[in-house]
Image (cartoon, helix red, strand yellow):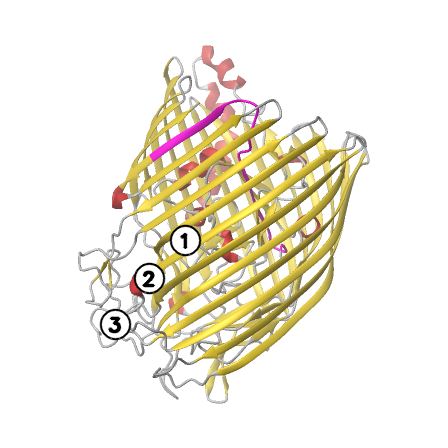
Amino acid sequence: MSPRLTALAASASGLALLIAAPALAQTAPQADVAAEQAVSIDEIVVTAQRRSENIRDVPFAVTAMNTETLNTLSSGGGDILQLSGRVPSLQVESSNGRYAPRFYIRGLGNVDFDFNASQPVSVVLDDVVLENVYLKGFPLFDVKQVEVLRGPQGTLFGRNTPAGVVKIDTIKPGEDFTGFGSLAYGNYGSTRAEVGVTLPASDTLSVRVAGLWNHRDDWVNNAYDAPFAKKDGKDLGNFDDFAGRIHVAWTPTDRLSTLLTLQARDYEGTGTMNRANVLTKGSNELNDRFDRDTVHYDGGRNNFQKQQTTSQSLQVAYDFGPATLTGVVGSYQGSSAGDGDIDGGVLGDPINSGTVPFPSETGTLTSDLIQNTYELRLSSNGDGPFGWQVGAFYWNERFNLVSGTFNGFGAVAPTVVGDIVQKSDSWSIFGQGRYQVTDALKLTAGVRYTDDSRDFSGRRIIPAGSPSTMLPLANVTKSVGDQQISWDISAVYEVSPDLNLFARVADGYRGPSIQGRITSSDIVTTADSETVMSYETGFKARLWNGRARLNGTVYYYEVSDPQFTAIGGQGNFNQLINAAKGEGYGVEIDGDVYLGAGFSLAGGFAWNHTEIKDQDLLVPICRIPSAGAAPICTPTDPLVTVGTTPRANINGNPFPQAPEYTANLTLNYVRPIGGDAELFVSTDWVLRQDFNLFLYEAVEFRQDSQFEGGLRAGWRDLGRGLEAAAYVRNITDEANVIGAIDFNNLTAFVNEPRMYGVELTKRF
């Protein structure tokens, strides 16, 4: 069966199981039928509109992942990249290891690998936006729920949300002494220890303390005898990730509540492992050079990474009776460093590395970030027919990146140094109102005014004695800014207590951008603001006496001046461009069902079609060794010669990293064994089909089907709060290409290997 048919069959099978669920129950002994029919799936409450409500009442597509799902995905040391494909239309990838992930919703995202890149998907952690990709990799621990809001969210969540929002809510302090501790150990020395404890100090004061330690040993051998190799057979693959959080909740009166949050992270480990020439010209399959356990690096210092971040936030809410005033102040600080053998091989080693025409080693010498956010909201209270909220928001950021390129072979000093500073400011005012027109019909409308500005300055330094032929670059400055109005109008119609229909029209906006990798090029590029007009309609249903849930959405959007990043080609740098138009449309389905006899099923499917619409848009292709020579890859786009260099016409191409088909499926089984004890087993699978790695299309960089599955099984005693489990992630040890490099050779990097182990958890 073809991968496309496999994805469709998986989704069709899930729907068939939903339809067949009542029949399955009827096959059970008659005495058990009543008990089976009494089982219902839990209601899901979300805060996608900055207020708590049933997910069926939200007038756009939103999917929530609970603590159990997140814990399963984190087994074996998984990070935020494991969210990819777990809900319809969500893609997450990174070429920066375990930080700086890139998010895509419905195909909209940004493949730019630099830390100062902007994204059209926002990540919001405990009501504080994580604007910079530098922050979006903060580890998930002690999390209550993750909500994925699809489509423009500019009214309530502000700038850079035309694709959607990933909203993360951690567990907050409560009135009771509760908590948990878990410890997992697996192959490669993988160790994950997590703890979360609520400590009520008084009737008005409560504290939640949570922490994480995530570890893995080195498991990859650098077969090249580099000066920095550890000489013990294992040089790369390790990481140590320490993170902690303290919530302090103080409620001195029935009207006033406060929440102080302090967080910190200290991470050190191996970055992305590029592998030279593991793709063969004319094929997108990994060749015989690919070996999970071995690389050949003459640079990169074992691809080390370091990052430290701290944050502080304060939320204060006062209930005036008719309305509640909420203020949120947040601040993040961070620093990082790292290095990488970008070409992924050794110059002059054609057998193991293939052709590596020149060594490419780049690194972050230092990077420092300060982000501050301020938000004030006034929201109506009560259950009257009219509700509203208004507010103001301010965000500013200062990011300083000092990067370097090296000449390989263990060079201890950079040959070129680039020093950039980017300062960004954004302020906005917003409002939203909802009106219950009839008992069945509710209308919602919102509007936001945003003012953005961004300033960039950079200089290039050539250290004394450097062999580089590049020239120093005096301070280069660029500034961009814009003002936009975003809005949305939506309706929810209750056909019955178990079926809602919804429709939404929304206008989204991403602010202008600047990019300049001045260690590799003199070019500093800018991109104008992009705007998105989105239309979607669908249904949200509970079926069969609450034993099943099914949601479906059909959407269409058009992007004016979409921002894209042309990566690589003839050099290791990014260039921002605007296309004339972009278009996307598709179908999303997700749901879950209790099948009976202890079985439950959850899954989702998405078909996403994206298309660049610009007849004159040309971008660089993969490296051309010399004038008149054939490129190292096999472009399938029409080529146009500009000067002496071919360019690809990308009109009609899909957006990069935008799978046309995605599907996910989770099957759970629980069997009581007496008292409060039970056995459980769960298997989950995700599939991605048909996507490009770059803006241009080439045989080597067009990915067909990719899938990955996991299994978790064990025993738990609900009365004593004990759980013991065994897990396997990437159970079939798939090697899926998640990114490539085209400016030097046919280098690629892949997903995590098979991870397995055991886990013990105690809850109280």
Percent coordinates x, y for residue 19 in the rendering = 52, 31
Q: Residue at x 45, y 85 (%)?
A: 471
- Stretch in magenta: 161-183
Percent coordinates x, y for residue 524 in the rendering = 55, 76
Closer to the N terminus: mark 2 or mark 1? 1
Instruction: Return the residue at label 2.
Output: 303
Percent coordinates x, y for residue 97 in the rendering = 39, 56
Query: What separation in Å lies between label 3 and label 2 (alpha carbons)?
Result: 14 Å
- Please indicate, yes or no, whether residue 159 appears anywhere in the rendered image: no
Q: Are marks 1 and 3 in contact (CB under 8 Å)?
A: no
Few, some or many residues within 10 Å of mark 3 (<14, 14–19, 20+): many
Single out the residue that lies furthest toward the top.
31
Front position in the image: 27 or 62:
62
Front position in the image: 374 or 754:
374
Instruction: Return the residue at label 3.
Output: 346
Instruction: Return the residue at label 1.
Output: 98
Q: Amino acid at mark 2?
A: Asn
Task: Please tell me whether mark 3 sits on a helix, a strand or a loop.
Answer: loop
The correct choice, above or below, for 11 with respect to 175 in the image is below
The correct choice, above or below, for 534 with respect to 462 in the image is above
Query: What separation in Å lies between label 2 and label 1 (alpha carbons)?
Result: 12 Å
Magenta span contains residue 169: yes
Q: Residue at x 18, y 60 (%)?
A: 231
Q: In which quadrant will I find the C terminus?
A: top left
Return the mark for residue 599: none
Q: Amino acid at mark 3?
A: Val
Few, some or many residues within 10 Å of mark 2 (<14, 14–19, 20+): many
Q: Amino acid at mark 1?
A: Arg
Query: What separation in Å lies between label 1 and label 3 (alpha carbons)?
Result: 25 Å
Percent coordinates x, y for residue 724 in the rendering = 33, 27
